[in-house]
């Protein structure tokens, strides 16, 4: 009818829009919020409830700059990360409101992408959080984003292929909306955990991602090289959201120096390699997006229209690899345990400073006594001590006695651990005891802290991969390592069920023998022998002779996970002279060793003094 108002043309679906043009995503939300006075120690996600006007202001600035896709302010709005701020109870509200704020700002001008980042914890096989548990955490967040009305889900800044796979599976269990799955990479193109794009791109496609991409960590130039490698191995459209270059410290602030014009030139280059969603990450601003929009306006796919077909979801990445070296051939200790022979070991502490002659001399003495190996702890008692790895190499080379190297996860990231272990193997070390490690707030440096990227279960999985000729990213390392993998068990753990559960995971991961924490309670040890027997792993029991009554009381009352029966404490109290106390401590340790002998395949003595003679006095005749 004449004079009637024409009906509004509905916005095409995201996939239809991608068939016609390149879509521009927004830039950094965190950068903008920080520039508006929000401190980095605050939960940016909580601003959806606390300062919705500020979040909306950022979204509006990106819409005005020409963004076709707005990401919700929910990157860290999962149960784990919100828990560090005490905001778990607000999880649903933060995500729902985040989606609604973006929806209002977008109107009909832009699509809304529900932003989902990594959990902030390691999942299996590197951490104690199971893949199914991780999926539930992601489902919880994604469900709230869907309730808020997003058009798609964007998974971004993931370093772990298993974790982003779990996230895609979680989304696919709830919705068939488009999913952009983005890994974050180093300048060499591999993920931060070392997975190459030739591996992670097909794997993300297999899980059911709609668009594959990379974001964060690097600037446009190295990201373009990664995009080119991805293009060669996947048929799906790609996305690219680089940082505005590397940050520079300018008077205590991180400043990103890539100009908007420079970012725009690379946006045009991305488009030539099947990138259909382009935007920016850390350091990018509305001006960057405005220039990128101008650069790609009117761009069309080089190869013409691409039709996306469904990709089966599910599954996880499994590293292939070579046939492992047989256990008996890995080391003398491995051969002895595989043959069922009883073994004896003594702990040697790394010395203060770098002079190791005295420790090497003690190792020679122990070898003369018939000791099979010396156990070298990692990071003992803080202070400036020689590294355990260096001492192990010196002992093996100069004393010609095999070592068992403690290797702790504490203060090491996954790739650093991998490099250390490859170096240890190149230097000839074969026997390793893989432990999580204790917190670092002890010893000479009470303010020292500890960082744990993985735990002992993840570490065991890592070494098992190396023993199959694969690194953590699934790449071939050539000839497989031949590590003889030991793990720890505490028969007196406060939560024995949890200790045995973790032990079962270590066995599944690839453990080949067990070294127990010091045993003082024979009855308590007998309670775990059934679990040890079911593992079918050789068991070496730890023994520690008391030095005096004070030492015994300290172990009983101040060392976590140690249980000393009262009768043993009373015996040490009665030994009131130093020489008598040392003799009584050795006598008790020998009695424990004799009692344990029928239940285990080896014994190892630890002594704070490092006295080879006293250690041998405990073990003499027990072979």
Image: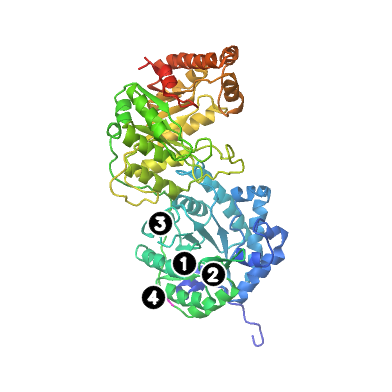
Q: Which of marks 4 and 1 is in front?
A: 1
Query: In this orientation, which residue lies closer to the viewer: 208 or 79?
Result: 79
The 10 Å Cα crowd at callout 3, few under 14, some 14 to 19, many 20 or more, is many
User: The N terminus appears in which quarter of the rendering?
Assistant: bottom right
The secondary structure type at the circle numbered 4 is loop
Image coordinates for residue 147, horizontal then vertical, percent: 62, 57
Q: Can you tell which quarter of the image residue 341 is in?
A: top left
Indicate which disc, 3 or 2, sits on the residue closer to the N terminus: 2
Residue at 46%, 26% (x, y): give it: 606
The secondary structure type at the circle numbered 1 is strand
- Residue assigned mark 1: 239
Indicate which disc, 4 or 1, sits on the residue closer to the N terminus: 1
Image coordinates for residue 288, horizontal then vertical, percent: 55, 74
The region drawn magenta spans 300-304
The span from disc 3 to disc 4 (Cα, nearest Å) is 25 Å
The span from disc 3 to disc 2 (Cα, nearest Å) is 22 Å
Question: Does 218 sit above or below residue 141?
Answer: below
Image coordinates for residue 197, horizontal then vertical, percent: 39, 59
Q: Residue 200 carries which label?
A: 3
Indicate which disc, 1 or 2, sits on the residue closer to the N terminus: 2
- Residue assigned mark 2: 25
Q: Which mark is residue 304?
A: 4
Indicate which disc, 3 or 4, sits on the residue closer to the N terminus: 3
Q: Can you tell which quarter of the image residue 47 is in?
A: bottom right
Image coordinates for residue 608, horizontal then vertical, percent: 50, 27
């Amino acid at each position: 009818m004449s004079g009637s108002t024409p009906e509004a043309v509905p916005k095409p679906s995201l996939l239809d829009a991608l068939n016609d043009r390149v879509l521009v995503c927004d830039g950094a939300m965190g950068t903008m919020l920080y520039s508006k006075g929000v401190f980095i120690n605050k939960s940016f996600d909580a601003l959806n409830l606390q300062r919705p006007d500020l979040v909306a202001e950022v979204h509006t600035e990106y819409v005005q700059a020409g963004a076709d896709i707005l990401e919700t302010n929910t990157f860290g709005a999962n149960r784990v990360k919100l828990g560090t701020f005490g905001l778990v109870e607000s999880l649903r509200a933060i995500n729902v409101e985040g989606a609604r704020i973006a929806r209002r700002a977008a109107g009909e001008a832009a699509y809304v992408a529900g932003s989902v980042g990594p959990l902030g914890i390691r999942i299996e096989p590197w951490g104690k959080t199971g893949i199914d548990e991780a999926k539930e955490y992601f489902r919880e967040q994604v469900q709230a984003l869907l309730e808020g009305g997003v058009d798609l889900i964007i998974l971004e800044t993931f370093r772990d292929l298993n974790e982003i796979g779990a996230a895609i599976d979680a989304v696919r269990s709830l919705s068939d909306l488009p999913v952009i799955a983005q890994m974050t990479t180093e300048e060499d193109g591999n993920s931060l955990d070392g997975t190459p794009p030739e591996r992670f791109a097909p794997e993300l496609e297999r899980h059911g991602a709609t668009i594959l991409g990379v974001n964060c960590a690097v600037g446009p130039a190295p990201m373009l090289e990664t995009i080119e490698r991805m293009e060669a191995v996947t048929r799906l459209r790609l996305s690219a959201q680089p940082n505005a270059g590397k940050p520079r410290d300018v008077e205590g602030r991180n400043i990103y120096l890539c100009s908007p014009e420079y970012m725009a030139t690379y946006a045009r280059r991305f488009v030539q390699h099947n990138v259909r969603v382009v935007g920016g990450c850390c350091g990018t601003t509305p001006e960057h997006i405005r220039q990128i929009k101008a650069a790609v306006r009117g761009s069309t796919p080089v190869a013409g229209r691409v039709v996306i077909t469904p990709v089966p979801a599910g599954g996880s990445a499994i590293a292939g690899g070579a046939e492992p070296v047989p256990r008996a051939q890995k080391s003398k200790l491995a051969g002895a345990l595989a043959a069922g022979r009883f073994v004896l070991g003594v702990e040697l502490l790394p010395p203060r400073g770098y002079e190791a002659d005295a420790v090497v001399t003690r190792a020679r003495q122990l070898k003369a006594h018939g000791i099979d190996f010396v156990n070298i702890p990692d990071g003992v008692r803080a202070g400036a001590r020689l590294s355990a790895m260096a001492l192990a190499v010196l002992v093996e080379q100069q004393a010609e006695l095999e070592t068992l190297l403690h290797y702790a996860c504490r203060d090491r990231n996954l790739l650093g651990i991998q490099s250390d272990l490859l170096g240890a193997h190149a230097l000839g070390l074969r026997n390793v005891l893989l432990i999580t490690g204790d917190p670092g707030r002890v010893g000479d440096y009470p303010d020292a802290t500890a960082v744990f990227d993985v735990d002992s279960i993840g570490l065991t999985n890592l070494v098992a991969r190396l023993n199959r000729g694969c690194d953590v990213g699934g790449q071939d390392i050539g000839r497989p390592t031949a590590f003889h993998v030991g793990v720890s068990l505490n028969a007196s753990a406060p939560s024995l069920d949890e200790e045995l559960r973790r032990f079962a995971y270590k066995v599944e991961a690839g453990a080949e023998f067990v070294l127990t924490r010091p045993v003082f309670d024979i009855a308590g040890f007998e309670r775990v022998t059934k679990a040890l027997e079911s593992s079918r792993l050789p068991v070496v029991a730890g023994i520690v002779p008391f030095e005096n009554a004070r030492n015994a009381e300290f172990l009983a009352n101040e060392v976590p996970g140690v249980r000393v029966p009262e009768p043993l404490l009373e015996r040490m109290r009665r030994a009131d002279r130093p020489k008598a106390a040392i003799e009584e401590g050795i006598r008790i340790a020998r009695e424990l060793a004799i009692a344990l002998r029928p239940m285990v395949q080896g014994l190892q003595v630890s002594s704070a003094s490092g006295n080879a003679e006293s250690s041998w006095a405990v073990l003499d005749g027990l072979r």
